[in-house]
Structure formats: C-alpha cells, structure tokens
Image: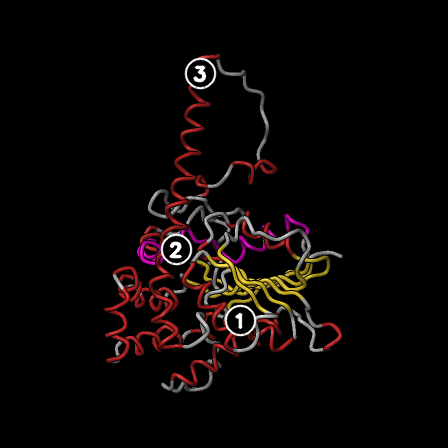
C-alpha cells in the first residue's frame, strides 16, 4: 500500500504516486550506486531543488490564506443556519430523515458521541480525558461540548481569526472561559508542548491539511502517553492493489471540490492507517461512515435554498457562493463511491 498524499494543491499536480516525497518509498526501492554529479550539475540541481521548495512553500501559504478567508467569510452563515457545529451529522441509514433543522443538529451531536464511542473513550468518569485539543475547531462547538461532557480543559486552534474570536466569545457567554480557549494557529505546527493532551480531536479538518504525514505527526506529538487520537475526515476511496492512481474522471471531480473549498490533494483512509502504523501508534481502527452521513449534504442544500439561506449566502461573499455551488458534487461523489467519510482512531503508546 503506498501513500497518496501531497503537499501541493490539486491544481498543481495530478493524483499520482509520483507526487509523493521520495522518502516515503525508500524502504521499498532498491538502492544502487550513482556517481555524484559534476560541480556544475550539482549547483544547478541544488538551485532547482531550492526553487521547487520555495514554490511549494508559496503554494501552501496561498492555500492556508484561502482556507482562513473562506471560514472568515462563511462561518457566520453556517452558524446562523446550523448552529454551533460545522460538521456532518450521523444518521441511521435505516431510519427516514426528517427535514427539521433541529433533527439535523441532533445528528451533529450524535456524530460527536459516535466518534467518542468508536475511539474507545471510556464512559468511566475516572478515565475521562482531562485535557483536549480541538484541531480545526471552527467556532468551538466540539470543544464546548467535550468540556461540558468530561469537565475537561479544551484548547482549540483554527486558521480563521473570525472563528477564533467567535469561539472565545461563545465560551464566555456559556460560562466556559475557564475551561475552553481558542487561538489562531497552524495544525501542522501546533503551539503546544509534547504530550500535553489526553484526547486529540480533529473533526473534519484533515481534508484541509497539505501534508498529511506532518499533520498526523503533530497530532501524535501533542498527545499524552496513552492518549487517544480521533480523526474524522473526508477521504477518497482506497486504491486497489492494481491501481497507481484514481481514474481521470475521479481526479477531475475532486479537483472541482478542492478548488472551491481550498483543499489540497485528498488521500484515502488506508493512507492514514499507513502513516499511523509508521509512527508506531496503537489500537488503530478505521470505519467508513459514508452511509451514515448521506442525508447531510441534501439537508445543507435545502437550508441554503430557503429565503433566509439565500439572502445570507449572497451577503457572505464569493468564496462562500463558490462553495455552495459545488455541494451537488459532494453528493455525487458519495453516491459514486469516490468520496468516503472516514473515522480513523488510535492510541499513543504509554
């Protein structure tokens, strides 16, 4: 199984193993001696490598700026229509779904509870997490929920200053300012010491990460010994053993979504598992919850097509409108089996 993640936005490189850092494949390649390049060639090679690295850094910088601006612009609309939680709901695929927004908000709470259950977070109060980091915290819905449920101290990070300001404001209003705090920070370079958190929580933020290995490494770094890591994220389907990459139509389908939502290249749940295994993390589990979230995007579209939704959408700005226009592609992607809604959990060794 090979990694299929890249530090480059999808508009730069196609989905292919050749996009990946060569260090990820060294263990599976034969090493043969090659004569060193001439001084002139070496100088040219070094310059080219430096240029490529600078280009990559610039692209990632543009990507992060776009993510921050998208959420600065759209978070108010989302909160106005959907409340505290900026993530999918969890539904029973055998039960007919109501059109009530309150029912969908209840499904978002079920998503949190199901993720905790799947992640093996104990129901025993003596074993509840005391410290939590919410990576990609939105307006802090998960953090406030977990603080209330476990009595834990939660810290959230987001690239969006608007989200962070709103999250801190809501925490103060709910009397949780002593338990919950939020700051602008990069998930790939978290401002926390090693081993700080009993529970490392990432609810639908992994899809924005331009370097999945670095993302997971940071989650593992800040986790306390024995701490739980829960990643809930959008993925593409796992590649079969005979496939080198996604099919062309699949790449094109995902690129349209990526361009609207400021996403880098996607990876599969299997890719995440491979990274976790390489970091010697334990109790690794994954599940495909695509069927459990299937009613969510149609409900989002219906809420956007109300008078309140349409007027709010038009006020939000072009980034939010672009995102709304590709929502049908999310539904199609799920139906065609291209897009997967995955949960990946593990534990850091003691």
Residue 317 x/y as whole percent = 26, 63
Mark 3 or mark 1, which is nearer the start of the sequence? 3
Mark 2 and mark 1: span between their CA atoms?
20 Å
- Which is closer to the viewer, label 1 or label 3? 1
For label 3, the SS is: helix
- Left/right placement of residue 305 relative to residue 113 reads left
Mark 2 or mark 3, which is nearer the start of the sequence? 3
Q: Mark 1 points at which residue?
A: 142
Q: Name the residue under label 3.
A: 41
- Which is closer to the viewer, label 3 or label 2? 2
Report the magenta stretch's main SS.
Answer: helix
Dot 1 crowding, Cα within 10 Å, few <14, some 14–19, many 20+: many
For label 1, the SS is: helix
Mark 3 and mark 2: span between their CA atoms?
39 Å
Residue 235 x/y as whole percent = 46, 59
Residue at x 52% of width, y 72% of height: 171
Q: Do the residues labelled 1 and 3 touch (CB within 8 Å)?
A: no
Q: Mark 2 points at which residue?
A: 67
Q: In this view, does 270 lie above or below 291?
A: above
Which segment did they paint magenta?
253-280
The colour scheme used here is secondary structure
For label 2, the SS is: helix
**Residue toward you, 247 or 37:** 37
Mark 1 or mark 2, which is nearer the start of the sequence? 2
Mark 1 and mark 3: span between their CA atoms?
53 Å
């Amino acid at each position: 199984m090979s990694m299929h993640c890249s530090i480059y936005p999808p508009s730069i490189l196609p989905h292919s193993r050749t996009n990946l850092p060569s260090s990820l494949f060294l263990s599976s390649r034969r090493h043969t001696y090659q004569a060193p390049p001439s001084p002139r060639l070496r100088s040219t090679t070094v310059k080219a490598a430096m240029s490529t690295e600078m280009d990559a850094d610039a692209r990632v910088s543009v990507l992060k700026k776009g993510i921050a601006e998208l959420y600065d612009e759209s978070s108010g609309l989302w909160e106005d229509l959907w409340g505290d939680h900026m993530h999918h709901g969890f539904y029973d695929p055998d039960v007919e779904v109501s059109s009530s927004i309150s029912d969908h908000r209840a499904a978002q709470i079920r998503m949190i509870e199901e993720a905790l259950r799947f992640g093996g977070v104990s129901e025993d109060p003596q074993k509840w997490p005391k410290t939590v980091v919410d990576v990609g915290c939105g307006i802090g819905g998960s953090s406030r929920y977990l603080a209330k449920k476990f009595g834990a101290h939660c810290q959230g990070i987001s690239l969006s200053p608007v989200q962070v300001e709103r999250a801190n404001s809501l925490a103060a209003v709910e009397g949780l300012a002593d338990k919950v705090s939020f700051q602008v920070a990069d998930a790939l370079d978290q401002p926390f010491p090693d081993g700080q958190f009993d529970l490392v929580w990432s609810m639908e933020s992994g899809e924005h990460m331009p370097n999945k290995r670095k993302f997971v490494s940071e989650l593992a770094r800040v986790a306390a010994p024995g701490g739980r890591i829960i990643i809930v994220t959008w993925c593409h389907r796992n590649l079969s053993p005979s496939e080198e990459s996604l099919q062309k139509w699949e790449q094109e389908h995902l690129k349209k979504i990526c361009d609207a939502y400021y996403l880098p290249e996607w990876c599969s749940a299997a890719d995440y598992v491979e990274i976790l295994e390489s970091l010697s993390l334990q109790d690794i589990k994954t599940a495909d919850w695509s069927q459990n979230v299937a009613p969510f995007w149609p409900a989002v579209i219906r809420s956007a097509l109300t008078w309140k939704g349409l007027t709010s959408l038009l006020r939000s700005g072009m980034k939010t409108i672009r995102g709304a226009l590709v929502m049908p592609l999310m539904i199609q992607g799920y139906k065609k089996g291209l897009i997967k809604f995955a949960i990946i959990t593990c534990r850091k060794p003691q």
